[in-house]
Image (spheres, rainbow, N blue to C red):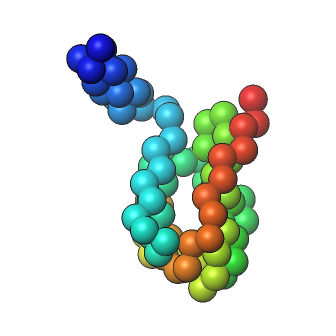
Amino acid sequence: MLKDNLYVELMEDLHPNRPRVEILGDSRVIVENHCGIQEYDDSILRVRCRGCEVRILGADLELTALSMDELAVIGVISSVEYITTE
């Protein structure tokens, strides 16, 4: 059973189009495989992804890294939401 679950997790990690969100405590979020930023200020970051939107809410949000497929934001993170668009 554990072997099957590990296989499923590995296959999901290898899917190139799925967004991957890494939350580090309440102060940093990394989003991989994004399609662009929809809204950004010091209290909200809305990130467009394939099939969903990732909404990060908090205070003193600051975009610290941005590339074609990865971004990082720091601040006081209060919530991370997935909103499906399909």
Coordinates of residue 81 in the picture (x, y in percent): 66, 53
* Outermost residue, bottom side: 60
Q: Quadrant of the C terminus?
A: top right
Q: Is residue 11 visible?
A: no
* Outermost residue, left side: 3
Q: Is residue 85 visible?
A: yes
The number of numbered discs placed on residues in the rendered structure image is: 0
Residue ID at (40%, 64%): 24
Residue 3 drawn above or below residue 44:
above
From the viewer's side, name the closer residue of 10 and 63: 10
Coordinates of residue 21 in the picture (x, y in percent): 48, 50
From the viewer's side, name the closer residue of 44 and 38: 44
Coordinates of residue 75 in the picture (x, y in percent): 52, 80
Residue 26 drawn above or below residue 18:
below
Residue ID at (49%, 32%): 17
* Outermost residue, right side: 85
Res. 61 image quadrant: bottom right
Res. 1 image quadrant: top left
* Outermost residue, front side: 1
Q: Is 45 left, or right, of 13 in this rendering? A: right
Residue ID at (72%, 65%): 39
Residue ID at (36%, 32%): 13
